Every structure is written in structure tokens, then in C-alpha cells.
Image (cartoon, rainbow, N blue to C red):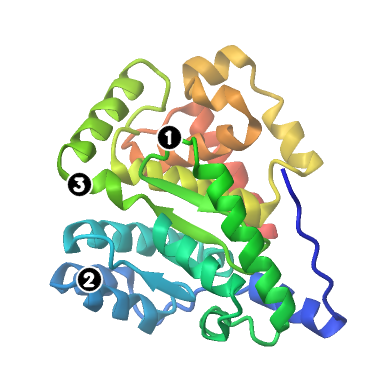
């Protein structure tokens, strides 16, 4: 896979570090936010709520129905209120196509995109263009043959990370087919208990975001903690998909804890350790 290296000055690096360490400021209880979300009748009203409370730099829910957009907003609210540092790692929330369009414009030198992301003092014009071009091509490469389902986290170095949702999965029978597959995968143990909904897929991606915040699976302490579980314990006590990599193990554990009314041992222990690292990070 191609890599992009951008040189930043000391002051730009300091600003980027501060950006990555941002935390959500809780101006009210989460119940007030949930009430506002439920009362909203249009996608535009939901976007205003996200902007007013500082959920992310850019939110674009125009590709979704109000029903789907409310689901996305409730997921964001729950995650951000429990883990306020998420806002430092999520810069764009919206559809895959919307994200690609943002990156395309950046690659063409659109400075409004750069300002909307709050990058005007961190990336010069040429660096912003390079990031946009790289991100746009990377997205096309990654998604060309991928079976994208419901949600994903796109990591672009903290400058333009995307929490993305595939709007085509919410249309007509496609959504019903996807949910049927999720239920089947949960029943046969490919995914964790309780993880058979759109929300559970999104919470899986939240797990990847938390892993990025904590550097959990890349740290020696995190690796050592996960090595305590045998393949049999992971496969039968969490999911078979969790066996594919340490990153997926963590994401599956987070998904089960958020989605199940009675999370099992592996998920509960991994989540508790992740929370411990998050608090000490």
C-alpha cells in the first residue's frame, strides 16, 4: 500500500498534536441530546445539532433519510459521551461518496474544505492538496473490490479521518438483506452475541477508533494482554472474525459490549483493559 509523508514544522506538529488530543465538552446531559435528535424532523436539523455541540469538524448526512441519520447521531452521541477523546480522531462523518468528494476537492486545491476541517494552519496549500489526492486514490483502491457493509473508519493521520456509512445499504431490500446476513453471522458465531444490527457494525468501527486513540494493539502492553487468550477462547467466546487480527479482536469486543445486554468474559475483559488504557493515555 502506498504511503504519504508530509513534513510539518514544529509549530504545525504541535497544532496537529493538540488537534488529536481534543475532547468533547459535555455542555448538557446525553439525554438532552437524544431528545433533540428524536425531535428533529430533517437531516439538516440533525446536522445542526452535531455542529452546535462539536461532534466533529464536518458532518454531511444528506445521503441518508432522517430515520437513518437519527441512528447515526444516536451512535455518535453514545460513543462521544462515554469516550470524549473520539472527537479528536473523527473529522468527517457521512457517506463514503461524500467523503470521497471532500478528498477530491482537497486534491484540487479547494481551500474551503481545508478550512472546514480546521487544517488551514496545519497544512500548507501543497500539503493539503497532496493529502487530498492521496486520500482520494487510497479510497478508490480500498473500496473498488470491497464488500463495504454499513460502516467503516478511514484513518488519514488525524488530519481527515472519516467515520463513514454506506448509504446504499439503507435503500429498499439491500438493508433487509444486510441485516439478515448479520443475524446469520451472529447465530453461527462469525460475529459476537448481540451484534446483528446496523448499530453493532458502527460500534465495531468505534472499537477501531478507540484502538487508534489508545495505540492498544500496537503497544507491547496491549499485545501482551491479548496474547493471554487462546484461539479457542477467542473463537468460541467472542467471534471467529476476532481471530483474523488483534485489531479485529478489539473491535469485536467493543461491539459486543455496546450491543449485548450481557457481554461475555472475553469482550468484557478486553473492553475493561481498553478503558483503563484510555483513562491513562
Of tags 3 and 2, the one toward the viewer is 3
Q: Secondary structure at mark 3?
A: loop
In the picture, the disc for residue 43 is 2
Give the residue at mark 3: 171
| Horizontal and vertical percent position of residue 156 | 63, 60
For this view, does 244 lie left or right of residue 171?
right
CA distance for labels 1 and 3: 16 Å
Residue 103 in view in this figure: yes
| Horizontal and vertical percent position of residue 79 | 43, 58
Q: Residue at x 47, y 48 (%)?
A: 152
Pick the quarter of the image with the N terminus: top right
CB within 8 Å, label 2 to label 1:
no
Q: Earlier in the sequence, mark 3 or mark 2?
A: 2
Quadrant assignment, res 7: bottom right
Q: Is residue 239 above or below residue 44?
A: above
Give the residue at mark 1: 147
Q: Is residue 136 above or below residue 239?
A: below
Number of residue marks: 3
Q: Secondary structure at mark 2?
A: helix
CA distance for labels 2 and 1: 27 Å
Amino acid at each position: 500500500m502506498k504511503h504519504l509523508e508530509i513534513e510539518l514544522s514544529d509549530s504545525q506538529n504541535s497544532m496537529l498534536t493538540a488537534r488529536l488530543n481534543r475532547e468533547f465538552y459535555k455542555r448538557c446531559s446525553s439525554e438532552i441530546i437524544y431528545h433533540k435528535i428524536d425531535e428533529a424532523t430533517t437531516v439538516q436539523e440533525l446536522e445542526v445539532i452535531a455542529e452546535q455541540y462539536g461532534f466533529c469538524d464536518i458532518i454531511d448526512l444528506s445521503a441518508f433519510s432522517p430515520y437513518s441519520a437519527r441512528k447515526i447521531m444516536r451512535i455518535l452521541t453514545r460513543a462521544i459521551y462515554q469516550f470524549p477523546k473520539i472527537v479528536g480522531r473523527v473529522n468527517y462523518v457521512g457517506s463514503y461518496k461524500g467523503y470521497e468528494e471532500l478528498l477530491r476537492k482537497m486534491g484540487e486545491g479547494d481551500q474551503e474544505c481545508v478550512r472546514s476541517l480546521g487544517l488551514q494552519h496545519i497544512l500548507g496549500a501543497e500539503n493539503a492538496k497532496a493529502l487530498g489526492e492521496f486520500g482520494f486514490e487510497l479510497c478508490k483502491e480500498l473500496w473498488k473490490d470491497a464488500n463495504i457493509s454499513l460502516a467503516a473508519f478511514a484513518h488519514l493521520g488525524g488530519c481527515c479521518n472519516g467515520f463513514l456509512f454506506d448509504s446504499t445499504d439503507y435503500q429498499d431490500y439491500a438493508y433487509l438483506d444486510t441485516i439478515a446476513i448479520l443475524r446469520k453471522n451472529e447465530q453461527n458465531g462469525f460475529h459476537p452475541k448481540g451484534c446483528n444490527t446496523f448499530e453493532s457494525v458502527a460500534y465495531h468501527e468505534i472499537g477501531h477508533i478507540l484502538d487508534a486513540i489508545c495505540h492498544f494493539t500496537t503497544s507491547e502492553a496491549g499485545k501482551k494482554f491479548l496474547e493471554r487468550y487462546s484461539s479457542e477462547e477467542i473463537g468460541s467466546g467472542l467471534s471467529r472474525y476476532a481471530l483474523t487480527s488483534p485489531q479485529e479482536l478489539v473491535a469485536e469486543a467493543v461491539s459486543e459490549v455496546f450491543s449485548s445486554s450481557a457481554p461475555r468474559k472475553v469482550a468484557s475483559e478486553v473492553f475493561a483493559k481498553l478503558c483503563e488504557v484510555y483513562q491513562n493515555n
